Image (cartoon, rainbow, N blue to C red):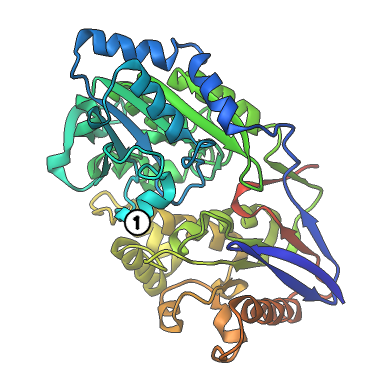
């Protein structure tokens, strides 16, 4: 019996199977750097920009009470913010050394349409209090709170642009984030820190709308001709940015690059870097693909990212098995996402897509991720060709979740059995079920890097 392992939260599960299983993943990054030294170097020697120190001093010379805003990602992204090897310590220290006081600095959590983070989650992510920056203000961006938004006009596509008020009114605007492949916008980071990070609900109607997402260019590592990238860039240019600090990481969440400076130029350099190692070359597609949900897969909503990558590697009408540790308080997703899932379950993917593309359709919050599940269903065909292995989502929730619940492959959790042991049994039984219901001698693939590697079939 072959034994392999798959990521499960901060642990790994053993995979037991009598069938051959191929393992594919990203190439090792050629870079392995220290944040404690590389981050300050990047701030001092940025790309196509004056240093952060120079910019900060210029702002204060014009207004000694100048306000600085730092936009950060929420905790669905593994951005190294905390500690002396993280971004926040060095960015804030640079501002303080330039003459800013802590109470002149506000951190805005650019969560887009995601839920607010609580105080404990914020400290866990950034460690501001522990770093001695407890007087720095922290605010959650609320995309549906009109009192927190300012209208800037319209994009060339007709989107009404509303941006976080604190950011627009700031004298010094700093955007941070992680650059990785993105299944809609091509790559994360850069302009995405602003759009969708700190935009209003109306601004998302086209950006996350069915027309943009139906484009063949709305895909991993595609920027040119990608309507989401074009829209986000235009919104970001309208909002303005004084300084960008983006990072790249490897499959083990280790820092591989810091790209600071001009929002467009620094981001382009970061994207160029990740293209060198995030692609997972394949010579063929597989009958069964197993994939971990990864760090981002804190709930079912976020796990769509892994499903999309698996769909790139699986044969038509093949089977996908997802392994997820859903740690978020909303194990499935927000109310809008749940509503959209129920419509998908009620009407099926074709009717659902027809509904959301109708001119008179009123967009539901987070329906865009359900559209992504529809893309997966286009490949695998029947919903039962998807198995979702998680201990965290209750059985009754699967009434509206596409696919088979991994819980169907284990008895009720027994006392004394660890989550890892339960998940290993679940995965083994789910894989055996998939094999028994697949073609004879199915070809099986494990995409070990989950949603972070981008499978690409060559030839």
Q: Nearer the viewer, residue 245 or 409?
A: 245
Compared with residue 1, is residue 138 higher up or lower down, i.e. above or below?
Answer: above
How many neighbours does mark 1 have within 10 angstroms: few (below 14), some (14-19), or many (20 or more)? few
* Quarter the C terminus occupies: top right
Q: Nearer the viewer, residue 320 or 328?
A: 328
Q: Is residue 164 visible?
A: yes
Compared with residue 165, is residue 138 higher up or lower down, i.e. above or below?
Answer: below
> Residue 6, percent across and down?
70, 64
As helix, strand or loop, the secondary structure at mark 1 comes to helix
* Quarter the N terminus occupies: bottom right
The image quarter containing residue 227 is top left
Q: Is residue 195 visible?
A: no
- 297 horizontally vs 287: left or right: left
Identified at 23% across, 42% down, the residue is: 202
Compared with residue 15, is residue 413 higher up or lower down, i.e. above or below?
Answer: below
Tag 1 residue = 120
Identified at 63% across, 77% down, the residue is: 423
Compared with residue 64, is residue 244 higher up or lower down, i.e. above or below?
Answer: below
> Residue 342, percent across and down?
36, 71
- 168 horizontally vs 402: left or right: left
> Residue 233, percent across and down?
40, 26
Q: Nearer the viewer, residue 277 or 138?
A: 138
- 394 horizontally vs 454: left or right: left
- 397 horizontally vs 4: left or right: left
> Residue 363, percent across and down?
27, 53
Identified at 31% across, 67% down, the residue is: 339
Identified at 42% across, 80% down, the residue is: 399
């Amino acid at each position: 019996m072959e034994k392999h392992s798959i990521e499960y939260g901060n642990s790994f599960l053993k995979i037991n199977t009598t069938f051959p299983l191929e393992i594919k993943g990203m190439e090792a990054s050629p870079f392995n750097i220290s944040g404690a030294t590389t981050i300050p170097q990047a701030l001092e020697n940025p790309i196509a920009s004056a240093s952060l120190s120079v910019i900060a001093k210029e702002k204060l010379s014009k207004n000694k009470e100048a306000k600085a805003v730092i936009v950060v990602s929420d905790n669905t992204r593994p951005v190294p913010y905390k500690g002396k090897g993280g971004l926040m310590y060095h960015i804030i220290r640079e501002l303080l050394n330039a003459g800013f006081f802590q109470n002149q600095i506000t951190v805005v959590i650019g969560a887009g349409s995601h839920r607010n983070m609580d105080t404990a989650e914020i400290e866990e992510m950034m460690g501001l209090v522990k770093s001695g920056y407890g007087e720095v203000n922290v605010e959650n961006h609320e995309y549906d709170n009109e009192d927190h938004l300012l209208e800037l006009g319209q994009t060339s596509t007709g989107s009404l642009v509303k941006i976080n008020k604190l950011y627009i009114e700031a004298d010094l605007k700093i955007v941070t984030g992680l650059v990785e492949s993105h299944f809609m916008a091509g790559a994360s980071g850069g302009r995405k820190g602003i759009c969708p990070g700190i935009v209003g609900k109306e601004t998302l109607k086209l950006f996350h709308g069915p027309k943009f997402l139906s484009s063949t260019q709305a895909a991993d590592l595609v920027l040119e001709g990608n309507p989401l990238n074009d829209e986000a860039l235009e919104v970001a240019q309208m909002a303005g940015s004084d300084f960008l600090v983006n990072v790249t990481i490897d499959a083990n969440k280790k820092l591989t690059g810091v790209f600071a400076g001009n929002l467009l130029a620094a981001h382009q350099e970061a994207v160029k870097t990740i293209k060198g190692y995030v692609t997972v070359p394949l010579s063929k597609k597989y009958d069964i693909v197993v994939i971990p949900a990864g760090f981002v897969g804190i709930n079912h909503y976020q796990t769509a990212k892994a499903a999309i990558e698996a769909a790139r590697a699986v044969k038509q009408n093949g089977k996908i098995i997802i392994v997820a540790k859903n740690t978020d308080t909303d194990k499935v997703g927000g109310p809008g996402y749940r509503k959209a899932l129920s419509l998908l379950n009620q009407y099926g993917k074709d009717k659902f897509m027809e509904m959301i593309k109708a001119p008179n359709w009123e967009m539901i919050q987070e329906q865009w991720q359900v559209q992504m599940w529809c893309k997966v269903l286009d490949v695998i065909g029947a919903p039962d060709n998807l198995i979702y292995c998680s201990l965290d989502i209750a059985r009754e929730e699967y009434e509206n979740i596409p696919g088979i619940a991994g819980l169907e492959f284990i008895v009720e959790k027994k006392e004394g059995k660890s989550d890892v042991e339960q998940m290993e049994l679940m995965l083994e039984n789910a894989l055996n079920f998939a094999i028994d219901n697949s073609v004879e001698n199915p070809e099986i693939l494990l995409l070990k890097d989950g949603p972070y590697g981008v499978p690409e079939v060559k030839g």
